Image (tube, coloured by chain):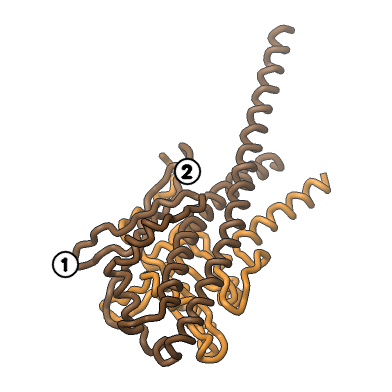
Chain colours: A brown, B orange
Amino acid sequence: MMEDQEEKGNAENGIGRQKQVKDEYLLQFLDSLDGYLTLLDSLSSTLSQGWLELASARHAMGASRINGALLDLKVHAAATSLKVSEQDVDSMESQPCFTLCKWASSDNGERSSGEEKSLSPQLRHRNNSQLSGIISSPQRQKSLSVFGVLVSPKLRSAQLSFERALETLVEIANLHTTMLSMFEQVHKELENTNG
Amino acid sequence: MAGRAQIPTKSSALIAMIADEFGVVLLCWDTVTGFLLAGVGNVDLRRKTNYLIVDSKTTVKAIEDAFKEFTTKEDIAIVLISQYVANMIRFLVDSYNKPIPAILEIPSKDHPYDPAHDSVLSRVKNLFSAESVASGRR
């Protein structure tokens, strides 16, 4: 009888632990979903600001100086790229982790690291001293020079806005993979419960 | 470990863009232009770009071809697609299930982001609505 009671206790503990694990997956999923929606909202604001600044730059410089004909179709590598690494979530799964590499120099066939931002799913803030150092990057100037030597300050602001949007997008991409991974876990747990 | 999907690691991958720019000339291609200003534009030796500007003349087939091309290229890690454009090829976007490249639906200037149309969020919604129906029956 003692053994029966012990077995019953162990079974209840096992069920309790399973429930705890399911709740944990669900909480992680809901957290990542909340972060995803928050970041999308932030992205919308940043993009709106960028579009407005681009429109202001076009108004200041003229439509002929900012149009599709100026897009650089010469062979060139992207100055801003991504690094993809594998991140172990737990012993059963791995997921990709994206890191933004901004304004990497591609001179002489070698890529030196520009600004590498390993972005966890949290919003980052930039201070003024970092900003002034970043503005002078030659790759950044080259990107602006497609529209002429003297460009409106609004075009520079638009460039910064879209860079911020890129950073947000990389955070969204990382949260996106976490969310999908948690979603699969929750889905599996629900199927096991129903099955 | 058996059954574990391998994530290809890359030290330098691209961001591809399929963005919509409908309307008159002055309102065109702003999203792509903005991201090109941020340095993501790439033109390879075959003069192929990592972006597609969608306008009133762009066919659905062209968008589908670009989506298939960008999602099968090994050097692309994230594909940005305006949600309005994604809605035109919704079946293709929803049936995509690889971890890389990641597909991110973004708002465009004339079409704000709608969570109801997001591929991932609608999958989540279907799961929880199916579960609530199943638990109701139980």
Task: Residue A57: give x, y in percent of width and height.
Answer: 46, 82
Mark 1 or 2: in front is 1
**Which quadrant of the structure image shows residue A23?**
top right
Please state if A49 lies on the left or on the right of B8 as rendered.
right
Does the image show residue A85? yes
SS at mark 2?
strand
Residue at position x 39%, y 89% from top?
Answer: A65
Pointer 2 residue: A93
* Number of callouts: 2
Q: Depth check: B95 or B121 in front? A: B121
Residue at position x 60%, y 56% from top?
Answer: A38
Residue at position x 70%, y 17% from top?
Answer: A9
The chain that hosts pointer 1 is A
Pointer 1 residue: A108
- The disc at residue B60 is none
Three-letter residue code for mark 1 = Asn
* Co-location on one chain, circles 1 and 2: yes
SS at mark 1?
helix
Quadrant assignment for the N terminus of chain A: top right
Label 2 neighbourhood size at 10 Å, few (<14), some (14-19), many (20+)?
Answer: some
Task: Residue B64: give x, y in percent of width and height.
Answer: 50, 77
Please state if B135 lies on the left or on the right of B97 as rendered.
right
**Of the image marks 1 and 2, the number of the one nearer the N terminus:** 2
Quadrant assignment for the C terminus of chain A: top right
Distance between the alpha carbons at the discs numbered 1 and 2: 39 Å
Q: Depth check: A144 or A76 in front? A: A144
**Which quadrant of the structure image shows residue B46?**
bottom left
Three-letter residue code for mark 2 = Glu
Task: Residue B47: give x, y in percent of width and height.
Answer: 30, 81
